[in-house]
Image (tube, rainbow, N blue to C red):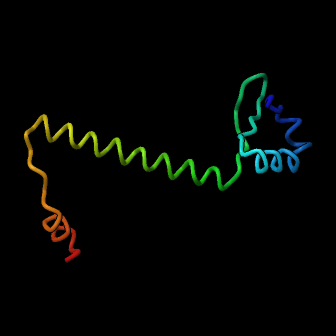
Amino acid sequence: MAPYTVSDARRRLASIIDEAREGHEPIYLERRGRRIAAVIDADDLDRLLELAEDMADIRAAEAARVEMRETAAAPIPWDEVKADLGLT
């Protein structure tokens, strides 16, 4: 789908929103030939944000594993973590 200019988007906002919701593809908006924004279905955005959060957690866990290998640190037992956080 070709991007819409911001001027076109102002005139066609309702149809652009419908297009994004029905097609489940982002609709890009551009100004002076450069993409500056996108219209995306809200449920699709929620799924993308959840996936991004999951990916951040995966990367953080991998970084922790690498750090433990490099420092030869032992993992902290889960019961100790819960106690430190006052969860027991």
Q: What residue is at 48 percent from the left and 46 percent from the top?
A: 52
Q: Residue furthest front?
A: 23
Kindly indicate the quadrant of the structure image that contains residue 80: bottom left
Residue pictured at 88% horizontal, 47% vertical: 15
Looking at this view, name the residue that lies furthest to the top: 33
Q: In this view, does 11 lie to the left or right of 51?
A: right
Instruction: Report the label total.
Output: 0
| Relative side of 84 to 33, left or right | left
Residue 33 falls in which quadrant of the image?
top right
User: Which sits in the foreground, 38 or 77?
Assistant: 77
Which x, y percent locates residue 38?
71, 39
In the rendered structure, the answer to whether residue 56 lies left or right of residue 52 reads: left
Vertical position of residue 17 compared to residue 2: above or below: below
Q: Position of residue 26 (x, y in %)?
A: 71, 40
The N terminus lies in which quarter of the figure? top right
Q: In this view, does 18 lie above or below 7?
A: below
Q: In the image as oriented, which residue stretches furthest toward the bottom? A: 88
The x, y position of residue 54, in whole percent, is 43, 49
Q: Residue at x 64, y 50 (%)?
A: 44
Q: Quadrant of the C terminus?
A: bottom left
At x 72%, y 24%, the residue is: 34
